[in-house]
Amino acid sequence: VAIYLTKILTELNTSLSALMKEVELYPIRQINLKNMDKAVLKRDDVQEKIALLKSKLGHPSLLLVRPSGTEPLLRITVSSKDEELLDRLTHEFVTWIKKEGELK
């Protein structure tokens, strides 16, 4: 990676700090929900809720909802430019998905 980055900087005739000035970092939330039934992600209503959340977050944003490969948990990653919207929608989704997929 370092060699590739050096090559890019040389080709662009710039420094890393100059290149990073153009990068805008957005707030990100990462949540691990333990004791969850991973099969909940296959349900149509859950997929619809995820699609709705993506549309509400707008562009540019990030939403990843995936099961752990080794534990009964769901990993949720959400990022958006608007931190207030990010926190509100993440809280709503996490509260909802806990009720839908928690193992009894």
Image: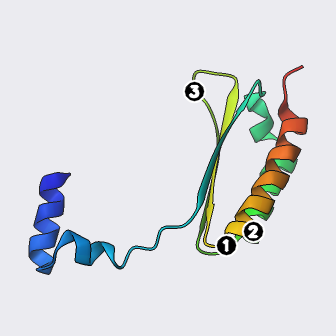
Left or right: 85 in relation to 67: right
Q: Which mark is residue 69?
A: 3
Kind of element beneath mark 2: helix
Does residue 88 lie above or below 17 as drawn?
above
Mark positioned earlier in the residue sequence (3 or 1): 3
* Mark 2 to mark 1 CA distance (whole Å): 5 Å
Where residue 25 appears, as percent x and y from the top left, is 48, 68
* Mark 3 to mark 2 CA distance (whole Å): 29 Å
Residue at image mark 2: 85
Where residue 82 appears, as percent x and y from the top left, is 67, 72
Kind of element beneath mark 3: loop
On the rendered image, what quadrant is the C terminus found in? Answer: top right
Where residue 47 appears, as percent x and y from the top left, is 78, 51
Do callouts 2 and 1 mark residues in contact (Cβ within 8 Å)?
yes
Left or right: 73 in relation to 9: right
**Could you tell me the amino acid type at mark 3?**
Gly
The part of the image, by quadrant, that contains residue 41 is: top right
Kind of element beneath mark 1: loop
* Mark 3 to mark 1 CA distance (whole Å): 31 Å
